Each structure stands twice: as structure tokens, then as C-alpha cells.
Amino acid sequence: MLENNTHRPYPQHLSEVGLVAACDDSENTGVAEYRTVAGVLADPEASYEDARARLQALVRAFDARLETPPTDHPTFIDGRSASVVVDGESVGVVGELHPEVLVGHDLELPVAAFEFRLDAL
């Protein structure tokens, strides 16, 4: 999403809803599709806390309970990511993108992001 918008001025705060395909042996096809929502903040001041606050506001609008237990995820900086747990079910992730990920996508500013399955709401 962001690497296609590097010609636009910063900061950029974007969100998107769409289908994501994932391997799932319980499905006849071996693949399951989930409707997800993703949000990214590309901003000199972007942080885990900013992404989590936006995530919290979104989940709260659906009257659901959010937990964000710390987790290690290769996309994010160590110690700056968490699982997204809605009403007791792990449905996504939130965090600050690792510098190697930023370089790999030609991004020059810090980026915080979240993604989770909408069916959890």
C-alpha cells in the first residue's frame, strides 16, 4: 500500500479492507479467505502506541474487547509488536515495521501498522 504512494507527501495514514487468502488444511481447497482490515501510519512520529490506539478505537466501535499480548513477529521490531486478540481469539497483529522491511519496500519513514480479521467483530 505505502510503496505505491511514495510520490505522495508524508505523513500518510491509510487503511484498507479486503480479502486475504491463507493456507488452511481444514478447507476442501486447502485455502481459506478472510475479510481483513489493515491500517498503516507512515510518519516521523509513527509508533506501536499510535497503531494500537487506532486499532483500539476501531474494535471499540464494534463493542468488542481487545487484548494485545506481546509477540515476536519477523515483520516488526523486536519488542514493538503484539497479537491482536478480540474477545479471546487471536485474529491479527500490530506493531512497528522492522527497518529491513522498510528498506525492502523503499520506505524512508517509520511505519506502524495493524491487520486483523473482521469476522472477529
Image (cartoon, rainbow, N blue to C red):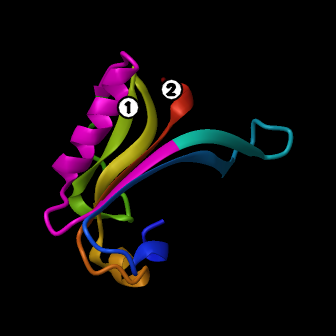
- Count residues near mark 2 (Cα–Cα under 10 Å), then give few for <14, some for 14-19, many for 20+: some
Q: Where residue 120 is drawn, which disc sits there? A: 2
Describe the element under mark 1 as helix, strand or loop: strand
Q: Please identify the residue farthest to the front as the structure is shown.
A: 9
Residue 22, given in percent of the width and then of the height, sits at: 66, 50
Give the left or right position of residue 6, taking residue 11 as reference. right
Question: Where, by quadrant of the figure, is residue 85 drawn?
Answer: top left
- Count residues near mark 1 (Cα–Cα under 10 Å), then give few for <14, some for 14-19, many for 20+: some
Span highlighted in magenta in the image? 37-66
Magenta span contains residue 96? no
Identified by mark 2, the residue type is: Ala
The residue that disc 1 covers is 85
Q: Where residue 72 is drawn, which disc sits there? A: none
Give the left or right position of residue 74, taking residue 111 as reference. right
Judge whether 64 appears above or below 103 on screen.
above
Q: CA distance from mark 1 to mark 2?
A: 9 Å
Judge whether 109 appears above or below 46 on screen.
below
